[in-house]
Amino acid sequence: MASRAKATIFDIAREAGVSKSTVSLVLQGSGLIRPETAVKVRKAIEDVGYVYNRGAANLRKAHSNVIGMVINDLTNPFFAELAVGMERVFQSAGIVPFIANTAENPVRQEEVLKSLMEQGVAGLIVSPARGTTPGAFRRLEIAGLPIAFAMRRLPESRIPVIAPDNHRGAYLATAHLVGKGHRRLAFFGGSSDLVVYHERLGGFREACETLGIDARDALIIEGETNRKGGMACLETSLAMAEPPTAALCFNDAVAFGVMLALRKRGLEPGPDFAVVGFDDVVEAEHYMPPLTSVAVDSAGLGERAAHVMIKMIQSRTTRAEDHIGAVNLVVRESCGPDRRTQKRPAPTGAAT
Amino acid sequence: MASRAKATIFDIAREAGVSKSTVSLVLQGSGLIRPETAVKVRKAIEDVGYVYNRGAANLRKAHSNVIGMVINDLTNPFFAELAVGMERVFQSAGIVPFIANTAENPVRQEEVLKSLMEQGVAGLIVSPARGTTPGAFRRLEIAGLPIAFAMRRLPESRIPVIAPDNHRGAYLATAHLVGKGHRRLAFFGGSSDLVVYHERLGGFREACETLGIDARDALIIEGETNRKGGMACLETSLAMAEPPTAALCFNDAVAFGVMLALRKRGLEPGPDFAVVGFDDVVEAEHYMPPLTSVAVDSAGLGERAAHVMIKMIQSRTTRAEDHIGAVNLVVRESCGPDRRTQKRPAPTGAAT
DNA sequence: CCTATTAAATGGAACGTTCCAATAAATCAA
DNA sequence: TTGATTTATTGGAACGTTCCATTTAATAGG
């Protein structure tokens, strides 16, 4: 109820019988003030119910202590993990991370970015929304604000990126399927407006080529990056003359959709059709059957991104090296051997 | 690279050949300035690469335009939904919501709250971390800051709450199980340091009583509110002399764990043991079998909470009515009839 | 006991806005 | 034309800090 006018350092000063400057000094933990004075002041701070006004302080101080994390989809545990990882390291560095969600909407992203700038953030970590225009960050760049991309990157941009090794992940997964004897491989889900898509698809293609598999474009089926998209992909693929026997999915959500659709058709994921996901979200382990997936350690990438940002801020630069995080294929039970090729002669050996 | 000293309204003023006051006026979209002047100024704003300093503005203005949303676990899609719902309405009200995660840690929560206060937020929406001490918000309350709790409440507190009707949800779910013929009902997961737990358990108990079921305390098994907790609960319950035939789970995660553990024992969730969850997260629909659960519409509650907050801010009050959101039981396939009681006479009718 | 040195505390200007009171310019009524 | 009114624009003070240059107090050196 009360809400009497907010207390300022002047109120503290009066209460403690010192000057405002002295109060400011103890607020900053300066060693210049006599311990007994500090105690006195701290008591006054408590008594008047003071809350520090960081906005006023930032008016004078060179840099603020808040950084913005702009996430494209907080609802996706995968990105939420990323945010949580970042938070962890920022917290222990005395930096306050504010999270904002763009809901995969570039317009919203623009607004959010503007707000964060106005708030005077010291840096920005962004997982850009799908459909972000290449120039969207140009203004922030020339303003000299440290920015890093996490998880996703923009087509042509000099902004440092912290992301998993999508290419290699896809390669590993594809090789795994080939090792199981599959020859008709599909790539399900995702769309070409995402750089990640090209990276993962690139790994898939390279693996096919290297291992002597014919990667027909017809089996590369774009789609939504969720369960629904996965279901749709499976349906179209099975309607083909020569349907695939296995699929690498753009992400786990797509993979779950594929498994759902298989079940609906009375097929058993694994024995009847091999599916591997990407991201290795927590549910992957608990699904029926447990999903083979490429683990990317998003929390770890978040931590990494936070460290990069801290370094950028400290060295007041806007440049940093990219960081490509290691991935590893977690083999579970969603990939049986190909029943057809099984009877045929041994698979071709892998080059490289 | 550049980062020449930040442009201020004075720079704009010089560039446009007007006074700083004029610039301030156009910045606020005042109707007092001549349109042509406004255009001139806006051009200058663009030219000098100006970014508004909200910190400086807040120094004068009564209230800021940012509100803080403090979430106990962003990793849980359930709470993430809540945040997303709030964001939606704040955005369209010109309010910038900053999300902070406490990771269910009261200490962290304290820090986060402090930061948000220092940042000068206009209000706070909080889903308090487990183990929050009753006095944790006392200071903020007496500071006269509008606060609302979402999803969770604190034992004794006058702060308004926006939460689902946990009691009724649990009642409905329990009645459903009884309707299926079950007589030995268990309540799995959760712990008594959560108010929500008491609410849900209360609904369970009331339903048992009303429907003439003997709710033995032995069958109320506390546990972690995740898959692991669910698995543990099932194990302990099956080790009993007279094990239950059905369970209401504290939330969906617990329910998933229960189903997992059933499978592991060669039992089929549904036919062999009925399980119902709470929250109705997205996976519930897609699980094997699809999980019967109490839907709470967290995004809707988030929107509601945001509206309440906006009203509190506008009417500069710290009081508001609680809002208890409707729930509804989504019946899917995880609850078969009790095989044992099936052969017995018809179940007792429900009173009330 | 006085001066030089160090330690503590202080006043004032500055940071980038908003808002009020005041001015200047334009319009109107007579 | 002149004063009254309205419309646009402006200077100055204030907001709550930090930081620098000073002042004051305490201590040491001779």
Image (cartoon, coloured by chain):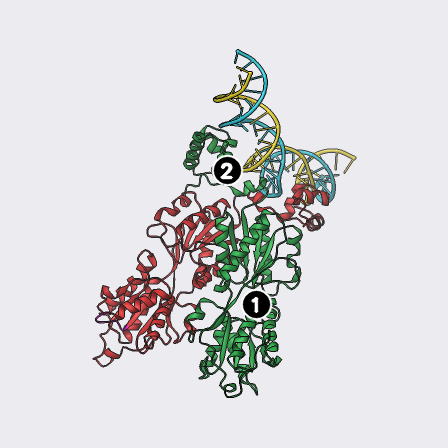
Chain colours: A red, B green, C yellow, D cyan
Q: Sort mark 2 into few (<14), some (14-19) or many (20+) by Cα contacts within 10 Å.
A: few
- The quadrant of the picture occupied by the C terminus of chain B is bottom right
Q: Residue A151, how many percent across, how many down? A: 40, 58
Q: Main secondary structure of the magenta part?
A: loop
Could you tell me the amino acid type at mark 2? Gln
The residue beneath circle 1 is B166
Asked whether residue B191 is in view, the answer is no
Asked which secondary structure carries label 1, the reply is: helix
Circle count: 2
The residue beneath circle 2 is B28
Q: Residue A185, how many percent across, how many down? A: 26, 70
**Vertical comparison of A66 with A173: above or below:** above
Query: Which chain letter goes with mark 2?
Result: B
**Vertical comparison of C3 with A326: above or below:** above
- The quadrant of the picture occupied by the N terminus of chain B is top left
Please give the range of residues in magenta. A240-245
Is residue A16 shown left or right of residue B98?
right
Q: Nearer the viewer, residue A126 or B140?
A: B140
**Vertical comparison of B70 with B226: above or below:** above
Q: Quadrant of residue B44?
A: top left
Q: Residue B112, how many percent across, how many down? A: 57, 56
Query: Which chain letter goes with mark 1?
Result: B
Mark 1 or mark 2, earlier in chain? 2
Asked whether residue B163 is in view, the answer is yes
Is residue A342 shown left or right of residue A136?
left
Which numbered disc covers residue B18? none
Could you tell me the amino acid type at mark 1? Asn
Q: Depth-wise, is mark 1 or mark 2 nearer the camera?
A: 1
